[in-house]
Amino acid sequence: MKECLETNWISSRGRFLPQFESQFADYIGVRHGVATTSGTTALHLALAASEIGPGDEVLVPAFTMIASVLPILYQGATPVLVEAEPETWNLDTDRLQERITPRTRAILPVHIYGHPVDMRPVLELAADHGLQVIEDAAEAHGAEYRGERVGGMGDVGCFSFYANKIITTGEGGMLVTDNADLAQRAKRLKDLAFLPERRFLHRELGYNYRMTNLQAAIGLAQLERADAYVAARRRNAARYRAALAEVPGLTLPVEKSWAKNVYWMYTILIEEEPYGEDRVAVAERLQERGIETRPTFLPMHRQPALLERGLFEGEKYPVADALGETGLNLPSGSNLTGKEIDYVCDALRASPG
Ligand SMILES: *Cc1c(COP(=O)(O)O)cnc(C)c1O
């Protein structure tokens, strides 16, 4: 960062950008990285570079953050929701087939809270139906599916480097892919679709989604510590599990035999009976002890901004609803100490009233 400031290379030109793109792509195990301003814009670029637009349908989980869905709408395409699976909370791969129509163009699986999606059935179904797979890996840097890093398994993967993600550049994102043409299109679109042959001649509508050299410098430093951050999250998760496994009414995050979960969020589900309190009361009680929490995502079919557009009318996703209503993200940062986790667990184990 000091080098950027001392040499004035503070914009989206500079040596750290290509370095960050190639090193992050290496980390995921793919050939190309295209740095962007956020995870949301990485997803938008992935859809735009895949030429997904009006009339096209994209399958996306009902239980996710709205940033997975907005870029589909930016492209004028239609999000089609897939019910959540109750164990990993990811999209239920048994429910994918029934959502495919002649208009389906892509599947957008989201590796929720750091647990990988069961990718094999997703990729098989996509191959059978000629669909694009765009992974939303914004919460899953370093997570693995059967030994492979997520984000590198579909046609294109998208990451966020927002401040609370596993590695961060403050704000920022990256699209990764093995497809050189797609990477090239994404690079052009993110830079206002300038043409190399004639400056200021534009044949396409582009965007300014350029990451800065300063952010890339932070990203490179973060990447050096990625394995340590992931190890810390997993250590923290093990400590939470050991302390909370026997508490009646609490459901803890799982790690399937084929998965390496990076526990972006350590999220628990709280059943009022037998736990003794509902999610809201627990959050308030923890807040009184200085412990900040977050509710789980409000599913997409509950979002007024989406319902107003006539989407998801009358559709029911009871599993996604239950996750959205009973879940609480506990403190999950890589810097948490064992003592801090014990303090949170003591509060959760203390009899509610
Ligand atoms: C954080 C996040 C995004 C968006 O990333 P930003 O960098 O905040 O735009 C997209 N999808 C999921 C699942 C996320 O958690």
Image: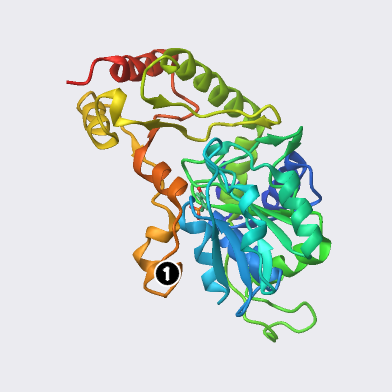
Residue pictured at 44% horizontal, 14% vertical: 338
- Please state the horizontal and vertical placement of residue 207, each as a whole percent of the image: 58, 72
Residue pictured at 46% horizontal, 57% vertical: 66
Residue pictured at 53% horizontal, 72% vertical: 74
Snapshot quadrant of residue 13: bottom right
Q: Is mark 1 within 8 Å of ligand 1?
A: no
Does any portion of residue 73 appear in the rendered image? yes
Snapshot quadrant of residue 271: top left
- Please state the horizontal and vertical placement of residue 141, each as a whole percent of the image: 62, 39
Q: Secondary structure at mark 1?
A: loop
Q: Which residue is mark 1?
A: 313
Residue pictured at 37% horizontal, 67% vertical: 305
Tell me: residue 164, above or below residue 131.
Answer: above
Q: Nearer the viewer, residue 26 or 256?
A: 256
Total numbered labels placed on residues in the image: 1
Tell me: residue 52, above or below residue 113.
Answer: below
Q: In the picture provided, is 310 more to the left or to the right than 165?
A: left
Q: In the picture provided, is 85 more to the left or to the right than 26?
A: left
Quadrant containing the C terminus in the rendered view: top left
- Please state the horizontal and vertical placement of residue 188, each as a whole percent of the image: 71, 71
Q: Nearer the viewer, residue 63 or 101?
A: 101
Snapshot quadrant of residue 303: bottom left
Tell me: residue 271, above or below residue 98.
Answer: above
Quadrant containing the N terminus in the rendered view: top right
Q: Residues within 10 Å of mark 1 (few under 14, many from 20)?
A: few
Q: Amino acid at mark 1?
A: Glu
- Please state the horizontal and vertical placement of residue 133, each as a whole percent of the image: 71, 57
Q: Nearer the viewer, residue 259 or 293?
A: 259
Q: Nearer the viewer, residue 39 or 1?
A: 39
Does any portion of residue 12 appear in the rendered image? no
Q: Residue furthest left?
A: 353
